[in-house]
Image (tube, helix red, strand yellow):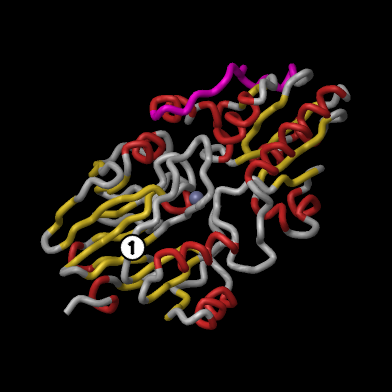
Amino acid sequence: MTDSSTIFRFDRDLYIPEIDLWLDSRRVKPFGFVSHAHTDHLARHKQILCTPPTAEFIEKRIKPTDYQLLKFGQPLVLDDYTISLHPAGHILGSAQIKIQKNGFSLLYTGDFRLEPSKTVETFEFVETDVLIMETTFGQAQYRMPSKQEVEDRLVERCRHLLTQNKIPIVLAYSLGKGQEALKILTDAGLPVAVEEQIVRFVPTYQKYGVEFGPFEKFDRNNLRGKVNLLPVNYRFHRFYKRLSNGYTIYLSGWGMEPYAERRFGVDEVIPLSDHADYHQLFKLVETIKPKEVYCTHGFPQFVNELKAAGYRAKILENAEPAH
Ligand SMILES: [Zn+2]
C-alpha cells in the first residue's frame, strides 16, 4: 500500500526513495528537484528537475549540469510514479511538485505566494493527500497589507523623495524581488537605474512575457534624479554608507516586524513579500483540505493551530527562514 511513510523520507532534506529523487536539497545529489532558483534551494545535482525559466536562472548561478525540464502541468512518468509541476507564485518559474503513485499523492509547495503578481505565474491550487508546505510567516502577527497597498507605498515614497531632491535607494533580492520592483517602478513611469546583479536575470523575464518600462544601468557616480535599485548586499558597501542625501528602502516581508528598520539598517522597510503570509498559509490548507500536512521553515505554533482546526499536522524540520 502507498502512504506517506512509503512515498517519502526526511533525511535533512525531502527524499522520494523509490525514484531516488531529492527535493530542494542543498547537498549535491544524482537527481534533484529544484523548486526555484534561490540559492537556499539549490545545489549542482548531476541532473536537475525544474521548469525552463528556473533552469535559465540556475545556469547563471552554477556551472553547467544536466536538466530534466518540465513545463507546468506536463506529466513525467518514472516507474510507478507520475510527477507534475504547478505554479507556486513565488518568483518566475517557481514550482510546486505533485508526486503520485497508485492513486496516492504528495504535494510539496516549495516557497509560495497566493496573491498574483505581474512578474510571476499565478499560484495553482492542486488537490493532494499529503501536503508539505513552507510556513515562513506562520505566525498571526504576519498579516501583510494588500499587494496593491504595498506597491502604492513604494511608488509614492520614491516619487516624493525625487521631488524633495533626495536619492531613493531601493534594496531587493537580486532574483525575484528585484525584477518585481523594477516592474512596479517602471510601470509607474519612474526613472530607474538598476544594478547588474538584478539586470542579468531580466532577459529571462522578458522571454517569458514580462514587459518592463525603460531603465538604465546603475552608476554609483550618477545617483541623482532616479530610483537606484540595488541588491540587498549593497547595505554593506562603502559607497552606500557614505551617501549623504540618500533614503534607503528595503523590500521584505519581515518589514511587518517591529524595529525592522533597525534590524536591516535602513530608513524604511516596505513589506513587499514573495511568501504567503499567515492568512494565505491557512487559506491554502483550507482550500485543498489534505489528509496530512507537514510544515517546513516555520513556527511550531502554526502546526498547533492547524491541529486545533482539525488537521493532522506535523513539523518536518526546523530550518532557517527562507529568502
Ligand atoms: Zn525563495
Rendered location of residue 172, percent (x, y): 63, 39
Specify whether 38 is left or right of 269: left
- Residue 118 percent location from the top left of the image: 52, 35
Q: Who's the residue at 47% across and 55% down the image?
A: 111
* Residue situated in front as seen by the camera: 208 or 165: 208
Mark 1 highlights which residue? 127
Residue 43 at least partly seen: no
* Image-quadrant location for residue 98: bottom left
Q: Residue at x 38, y 68 (%)?
A: 131
**Depth order, front residue of 96/236:** 96
Q: Give the left or right position of residue 176, taking residue 140 as reference.
A: left
| Mark 1 residue crowding within 10 angstroms, few (<14) / some (14–19) / many (20+) | some
Up the image or down, 317 lies above or below 179; here it is: below
Label 1 amino acid? Glu
State which quadrant residue 1 falls in: bottom left
Q: Is residue 212 magenta?
A: yes
For residue 6: magenta?
A: no
The span shown in magenta is 208-222
* Circle 1: element type: loop
Q: Is residue 80 above or below residue 61?
A: below
Q: Nearer the viewer, residue 65 or 299?
A: 299
Tell me which secondary structure the magenta stretch mostly adopts. Answer: loop
Please state the horizontal and vertical placement of residue 135, each as a whole percent of the image. 52, 64
